[in-house]
Image (cartoon, helix red, strand yellow):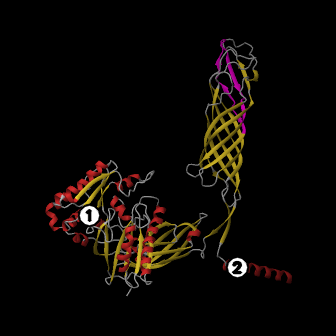
Amino acid sequence: MAWTSNNLTLRSLLLLTLLLLCIQNPVQAQEIKYTKPSWFFGVAGGANFNFYRGSTHQLNSSLTPPVTFHDGDGVGLYLAPLIEFHKPDTRWGFMFQAGYDSRKGSFDQVISPCDCPADLSTDLSYVTVEPSVRFAPFKSNFYLYGGPRLAFNMDKSFKYSLGINPAYPNQEPTPSVEGDFDAIDQTLISMQIGAGYDIPLSSQSHKIQFVLSPFVAFHPYFGQNPRSVETWNLTTVRAGVALKFGQGSEIVVTEAVELQVQFSVYAPKNIPGERSVRETFPLRNYVFYDLGSNQIPSRYKLLQKDQVKDFNEDQIAATAVVNPSGRSARQMTVYYNVINILGDRMVKNPSTSITLVGSSEKGSEDGALMAESIKTHLVNVFEINAARITTKGQLKPNIPSEQPGGTKELELLREGDRRVSIESNSPELLMEFQSGPDAPLRPLEFTAVQEAPIDSYVTVDATGSGEAYSSWSLETTDPAGQMKTFGPYTQEQVSIPGKNIMGTRAEGDYKVKMIGQTKSGKIAVKETTAHMVLWTPSKTDEGLRYSIIFEFNKSKAIAMYDKYLTEVVTPKIPQDGVVIIHGHTDIIGEESYNLNLSLDRANEVKNIMEKALSQAGRKDVKFEVHGFGEDESASPFENKFPEERFYNRTVIIDIIPAAK
């Protein structure tokens, strides 16, 4: 009894120790998994639905019935071992089957000259060898296959029966005759095509995985004439199922647990006030035309002759309100006055001259008409001497969007290439430090109320999610219980405008839930809370904003911007200032590519400015770099018109003074 009591105590202590170890070490949960197999072995079985056409008369040298047989049909057995290779989540592979292939059937009954019914059936069968190419068009379980069929004759037997004339029912029936066809081809070369669908019977937690594959195949009559004489041929439709098994390789899936993904939410205090920004707004030297028209589009603002004397480009700028957290229709209003701004500047600078170059997919003649439409407006409305304006046409712009061999989103690219370029060597019209035909027009400067800058965004940090999750989403719940979802995301840090989360609510405590999908398909959930305040500008905080415009698909800053960034923008950074650089793209191209492109553009600008600061001996400036790609919730403009898409190919530089 004493020994038994001690034994129970030891067992209890051991069990308690194990429980404590399990509680104290929830760092990683490992589960043995196996890859999907690439090689499969198994057996396929099914039915051949055989259809006879043509004719056969002489069965062999010793038997020629008095009638000719034509159509017929039958069902035979198909049974074959198989080998199959295809890597998981790929399109191409191959299959190989070799086995028993019955093409048995019966010809339709015919009436002999004695008014007696005649019947003919056969147990025709082969050993078939069928190598096939396997193609999964959607990288899914559905696949197509096709290839040659080599058939070696096994059985060529027949059974011929001649019945009695119904008018003489007492006649003795003629005995059936059994034999083998002569002139049977021993080898046939034909083809087969088919489709199948793989149904997994085992999970990836098993090393040996089984798959059931229903399939159907079509064997046309090409090459399937059984005999070297007469015209008998056959077509076969095969339906069946294959049972396959393969062996996966062991992998270790580490599930995302509490200590692997660090989830936090940073919501700036966003003290209410007012921030103003002095914006230097670039003027693209392009006027974009609608496809099929050589007239100036109606979205461009064109003055009447009696309005010219009252026009002032500074007044246009004063009406523009900057909204960098979303799209700015009013900024585009400034741009849509580009022809009026050009005319006003040429009136004030009578020594200036320009060349208008129209680019049209219809050819140089149509391009010249586009250029002439702007010249006519400048001459008739602004009374500019026609000799100061040269026009010409060409097929493509100097820096085209549509590249040779391109096949995607061609209509958007062609809209961007159908334009008139404003070229000039007059410095009064051009951007500072820049010259030549590709130089942009001098930008406009104006002060406007800035709404929701990048540094006011709610930042979600999910360090480690790139390894643990295939993707993750956010779910926010406001104090009233209203829920919003964001994502899915694959990056480890995400910035979201507070307005997108809060709407019109000024502030409140929010529940934030991160929902991650592990790479094994499981769901992991993390929760936190954050007090959020909707950003409003600060009256004592004034910033500067500059923009760099990039050409299509270019990540290197245009060479002429280097001097501008170095000698104009960088010296404006105050002591201990913060520079927030955010890159954007238009919607043309793959989303992941555009995300990387926008970040490359932003870093290119940062590198130029850092170099200029270093040469000036300054190390007091803090940089923040963001790449938003084509994200339309953060893009400066819409993407409906080509001019909007061109302005979205930008890097925006916000210079923020040091906090007081």
Q: Is residue 346 left or right of residue 56?
A: left
Residue type highlighted by circle 1: Val
**Residue position marked by numbered label 2 in the rendering:** 21
Q: Which residue occupies the foreground of this view, 305 or 221?
A: 305
Q: Position of residue 261 (x, y in %)?
A: 57, 74
Residue 206 vertical placement versus 479 (above, below): above
Q: CA distance from mark 2 to mark 1?
A: 73 Å
Q: Which residue occupies the foreground of this view, 402 or 164?
A: 402
Which residue is painted at 51% across and 69% down in the image? 491
Which residue is painted at 25% across and 71% down in the image? 317
Q: Position of residue 73 (x, y in %)?
A: 64, 29
- Contact (CB < 8 A) between labels 2 and 1? no
Labels in figure, total: 2
In front: mark 2 or mark 1? Answer: 1
Which residue is painted at 24% across and 56% down in the image? 390
Residue type highlighted by circle 2: Leu
For disc 1, the neighbor class at 10 Å (few under 14, some 14 to 19, many from 20) is many
**Residue position marked by numbered label 1 in the rendering:** 338
Q: Is residue 556 left or right of residue 314?
A: right
Residue 245 vertical placement versus 50 (above, below): below
- Judged by its main secondary structure, the magenta piece is strand
Q: Secondary structure at mark 1?
A: helix
Occupied quadrant, residue 537: bottom left
Q: Secondary structure at mark 2?
A: helix
Magenta span has 131?
Answer: no
Residue interval drawn in magenta: 99-127
Q: Position of residue 572 (x, y in %)?
A: 35, 80
The C terminus, quarter of image: bottom left
The N terminus, quarter of image: bottom right
Q: Is residue 35 left or right of residue 2?
A: left
Sequence-earlier tag: 2 or 1: 2
